[in-house]
Each structure stands twice: as structure tokens, then as C-alpha cells.
Image (cartoon, rainbow, N blue to C red):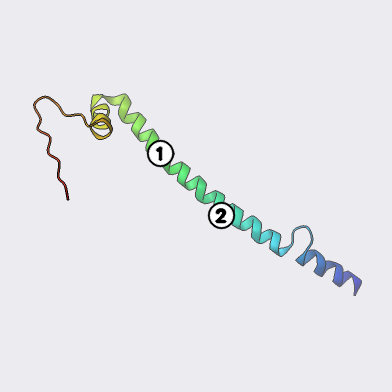
Amino acid sequence: MILTAQLQYRLWYGDGSIQQSQNYQQQLQALEQKLALKQQRNKALQAEAKDLRKGKEAIEEIARHDLGLVKAEETFFQVIE
């Protein structure tokens, strides 16, 4: 009887209890989600770095997007919705 009570106590409240296992599982899932986001971002940054190493086209694309680059022979049109 005492042994059963001790085992039940450990199962519900002690080290390695069901609640503690569930908490660890939730923490693991949250960390796996963060890891997946960081891996996705790393892949995007690696692709961008590869493009930047290859030539001026990637640099020009970034300048157009971030800085509003317009070449001398181009006409800029802004569409307002």
C-alpha cells in the first residue's frame, strides 16, 4: 500500500511527473518552431549572399527595392490604389 502511494505521488507530483513531461513537451515544440523559422531565414540569407557574390544584378535589385533606384533611361510610375 505504501509503495503504491509513493509511486502514485512520484507519477503525479515528483521528478518526471506527467505535468513536468507535458511542460517539457510544450517547451520542445516551441523551440522546434523557433528553430524552423531561423533555418528558413538562414536559407534566405544564404541565397541572398550567393546572389550578391555572383554579380551586380542582385545589388541593383536591392537598391531598387530599398533605395528607390531609377536608371537614367527609365521612367518611374507610381500606382496608387
Task: Classify residue 79 by image quadrant.
Answer: top left
- Of residue 14 and residue 7, the one placed in the foreground of this image is 14
**Of label 2 and label 1, which has the lower sequence position?**
2
| Residue nearest the viewer, comparing 66 with 7 | 66
How far across and how far down the image is residue 70, in percent?
A: 16, 29
Total marks placed: 2
**Image quarter for residue 71?**
top left
**Is residue 50 shown left or right of residue 12?**
left
Residue ranking furthest to the bottom: 1
| SS label for mark 2 | helix
Residue 6, compared with residue 77, is above or below; it is: below
Assess whether mark 1 and mark 2 are in contact (beta carbons under 8 angstroms). Answer: no
Task: Spot the residue most to the right.
Answer: 2
The residue sitting at 29% across, 25% down in the picture is 54
Q: Counting other residues with Cα less than 10 Å from the Cα at mark 1, is it few (<14), some (14-19), or many (20 or more)?
A: few
Task: Residue at 40% x, 39% y: name it.
Answer: 43
Q: What's the residue type where badge 2 is placed? A: Gln
Q: Measuring 65% from the left and 61% from the top, which residue is drawn there? A: 22
- Give the quarter of the image for residue 77: top left
Q: CA distance from mark 2 to mark 1?
A: 21 Å
Residue, x 27% and y 27% (percent of image)? 59
Indicate the position of residue 64 as horizontal and vertical percent values.
23, 32
**Kind of residue indicated by mark 1:** Lys
- Placement of the N terminus among the 4 image quadrants: bottom right
Q: Alpha-carbon neighbours of circle 2 within 10 Å: few (<14), some, or many (≥20)?
A: few
Q: In this figure, which residue is indicated by the disc labeled 2?
A: 29
Would you place residue 53 above or below residue 32 in this image? above
Residue 28 vertical placement versus 56 (above, below): below
Image coordinates of residue 50 in percent, x first then y, are 34, 29
Q: Which residue is mark 1?
A: 43
User: 33 left or right of 50?
Assistant: right
